[in-house]
């Protein structure tokens, strides 16, 4: 297990370097930068702009710029934001927990919905229950997350029962502890429900197909021929069906992070999505790279967690890694 973890961590580190290097090169190849916008301001002299370039190392070779940024980023010193005039690590630290609040909540809810529904649909194949679950899956797989968020916001704006947009009400700090919890949950409803419905729809289909495949396998046929109870059979089916399901955790986190960024912009949620949008529009190099760096780390951690869970569930995964 130690060798398995070491190998995966090494792979994650190489991936992190590759992603950040390509992103840095692409950003530098884009025409203009934040300092070019300052040239339009007649009050800022050319000497000041050149001094800023030298201060931030933007007058050096692109490869040298990246290496300096990478060495600093490994210690989580992500530079200084041009637009916000604050350390990038501080800006991301203030927003990342808001994004994780959405993604972790929707991930847990997606699993709690997808596993039982997929298991029921697979065990009740071609029944009305299975068809109803498949309709749920097809509908929410077909509806784009941003369109579903717009529909929910429209519904809430018409009813007025729940708040629309933001993370909390203006009088949040005056509320009691329970009042703050209720206020936060009410603001989380639209983004979390949107991400959960879209994510669980695809997971239900995956779980259903895995259950059907294992249900018709020789292993289950042998268990039934030995007179094993239905509960024990379902237990074995569920355990084996979780293997491909667990593998997708990392990809699901990637999808939720990208989907959360779009939903955050739509509902005005102060997370990494809105921060990255402002950074890209203003060509804030260090803020864009900092957001990509933290986002990539979150994705790699998600993939690593999926690998660990898969190795725990199926020891053959560890054996294959050791052999290879």
Image (cartoon, rainbow, N blue to C red):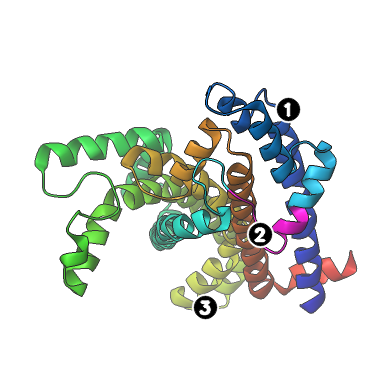
Q: CB atoms at circles 3 and 2 under 8 Å apart?
A: no
43 up-or-down from 8: above or below: above
Marking on residue 184: none
What kind of element bears circle 1?
A: helix
Instruction: Please name whichever residue, 44 or 35, is drawn nearer the observer in this view of the structure.
Output: 44
Q: Earlier in the sequence, mark 2 or mark 1?
A: 1
- In the picture, measured across the screen, residue 313 lies left or right of residue 95, that is right
**Residue ID at (26%, 35%):** 151
Q: Where on the picture, by quarter, is residue 226?
A: bottom right
Secondary structure mainly formed by the magenta segment: loop
121 up-or-down from 32: above or below: below
Q: Earlier in the sequence, mark 1 or mark 3?
A: 1
What kind of element bears circle 3?
A: loop
Q: Which x, y percent locates residue 257?
A: 51, 49
Marking on residue 227: 3
Circle 1 or circle 3, nearest the eye: 1
Q: Which x, y percent locates residue 5?
A: 75, 71
Measure the alpha-carbon separation of dots 2 and 1: 24 Å
Mark 1, Cα crowd under 10 Å, few <14 / some 14-19 / many 20+, is: few
Q: Is residue 176 visible to the viewer in this orientation of the structure?
A: yes
Marking on residue 77: 2
Q: For the magenta stretch, what is the residue range?
A: 70-80
Circle 2 or circle 1, nearest the eye: 2
């Amino acid at each position: 297990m130690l060798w398995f973890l070491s190998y995966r961590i090494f792979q994650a580190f190489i991936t992190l370097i590759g992603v950040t290097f390509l992103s840095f090169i692409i950003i530098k190849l884009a025409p203009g930068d934040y300092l070019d916008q300052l040239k339009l301001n007649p009050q800022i002299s050319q000497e000041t702009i050149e001094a800023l370039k030298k201060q931030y190392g933007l007058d050096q070779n692109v490869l040298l710029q990246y290496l300096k940024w990478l060495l600093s980023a490994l210690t989580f010193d992500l530079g200084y934001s041009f637009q916000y005039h604050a350390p990038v690590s501080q800006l991301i630290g203030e927003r990342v927990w808001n994004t994780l609040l959405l993604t972790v909540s929707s991930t847990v809810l997606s699993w709690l919905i997808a596993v039982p529904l997929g298991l029921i649909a697979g065990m009740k194949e071609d029944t009305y229950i299975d068809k109803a679950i498949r309709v749920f899956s097809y509908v929410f797989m077909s509806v784009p997350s941003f369109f579903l968020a717009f529909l929910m916001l429209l519904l809430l704006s018409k009813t007025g029962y729940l708040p629309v947009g933001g993370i909390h009400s203006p009088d949040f700090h005056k509320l009691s502890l329970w009042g703050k919890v209720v206020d936060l949950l009410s603001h989380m409803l639209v983004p979390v429900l949107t991400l959960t419905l879209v994510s669980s729809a695809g997971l239900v289909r995956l779980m259903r197909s895995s259950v059907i495949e294992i249900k018709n396998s020789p292993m289950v046929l042998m268990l039934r021929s030995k007179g094993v109870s239905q509960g024990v059979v379902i237990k074995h089916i569920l355990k084996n069906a979780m293997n491909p399901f667990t593998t997708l955790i990392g990809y699901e986190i990637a999808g939720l992070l990208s989907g959360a960024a779009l939903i955050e912009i739509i509902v005005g949620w102060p997370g990494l999505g809105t921060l990255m949008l402002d950074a890209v529009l203003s060509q804030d190099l260090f803020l864009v790279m900092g957001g990509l760096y933290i986002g990539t780390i979150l994705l790699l951690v998600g993939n690593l967690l999926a690998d660990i869970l898969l190795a725990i569930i199926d020891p053959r995964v560890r054996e294959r890694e050791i052999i290879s």
